[in-house]
Amino acid sequence: MFQGDYQALFAKVKSHLNDGGSCHDFDHTLRVMHNAELLLASHPQADAQTVMLAALLHDIARPEEDKSRGRKCHAAAGAAMVPEWLAECKFPEELFAPVAAAVRTHRFRDKNEPETLEADLVFDADKLDSLGAVGIGRAFLFAGHFNARLHNTETEALNSESYSREDTAYREYLVKLRYLPRRMRTACGRKMAIERAAFMTAFFERMDSEINSGDKLL
C-alpha cells in the first residue's frame, strides 16, 4: 500500500507525540487512523495511502500548539512539516501536496475547508474521536491538563477563555463538540457522529443536573 518507509514514519510520529498532551498523544492518532479505515470502507474510490498518511501525520505539530496555549495553529504548522517528514522516509513527492492539504484542513476551528474526498475523510476521522465515550474522556483529559474545574455552569463556560480555569470539559462540549455532527463531511461519518453525540449529550445533561441542579431527595 505505501510507497515509502512507512515503519520509519510511524516510529517517528510515535516518538514525537509520546511527549505531547494526553488527549492528543499517539493513542489519539491510532484511533483516528482506525476511524479512517472504517470510513475508507465506504469510499473505495478514495486514495487510501493519502488518507492514512494524513491521519498518521495530522497532529505532528500539536505539541507546539499546546506549548503556545493555542496561539500556534497545529494544522497549518503540521502541513508545513509534512514534505520534510515524508521525504525523510522516502515517500514520493507527488504525495506531499495532497497529504499536506488534508493535514491543513482537518481542524474544526479553522476557515480552511477540506477540498478533496481524502481531506474530508481525515476531517471526519479526527472529529469522530472527539465524540462518544472517548470524546468525553478526552475532554476531561484536556481540561485537567490545564487545571480547569471539573464542571461549571453554562454561563460560566460560555463567558470564559480557552486555557483558563473555566475551560472545562463542559465548555468544550458547549462551544464545539455538540456541533460536530452537522460539520461532518461524509454521510457515513455523519451517521457515526450522530450516534456518538447522543451519548455525549446525555452524559453532560446528567452531569449538569447532578452538579448545578441537584437530584431530588428520595
Image: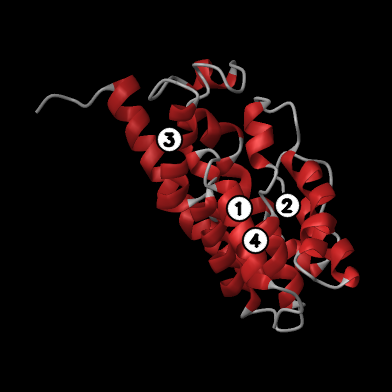
Residue 127 badge: 1
The amino acid type found where label 1 is placed reads Lys
Distance from disc 4 to disc 2, alpha carbons, whole Å, reads 12 Å
The amino acid type found where label 4 is placed reads Leu
**Residue 62 % position (x, y):** 65, 41
Q: Horizontal placement of 76 versus 143: left or right?
A: right
The amino acid type found where label 3 is placed reads Phe
The residue lying at 78 percent from left, 40 percent from top is 110
Classed neighbour count for the residue bearing mark 4: other residues with Cα under 10 Å, few (<14), some (14–19), many (≥20) = many
**Closer to us: 66 or 110:** 66
Classed neighbour count for the residue bearing mark 1: other residues with Cα under 10 Å, few (<14), some (14–19), many (≥20) = many
Q: Horizontal placement of 114 versus 179: left or right?
A: right
Distance from disc 1 to disc 4, alpha carbons, whole Å, reads 14 Å
Q: Tell me if label 1 and label 4 are in contact, CB under 8 Å.
A: no
**Residue located beneath label 4 in the image:** 56
Residue 140 badge: 3
Label 3, secondary structure: give it.
helix
**Residue located beneath label 2 in the image:** 106
Mark with earlier residue (3, 2): 2
Q: Quadrant of residue 35?
A: bottom right
Mark with earlier residue (3, 1): 1
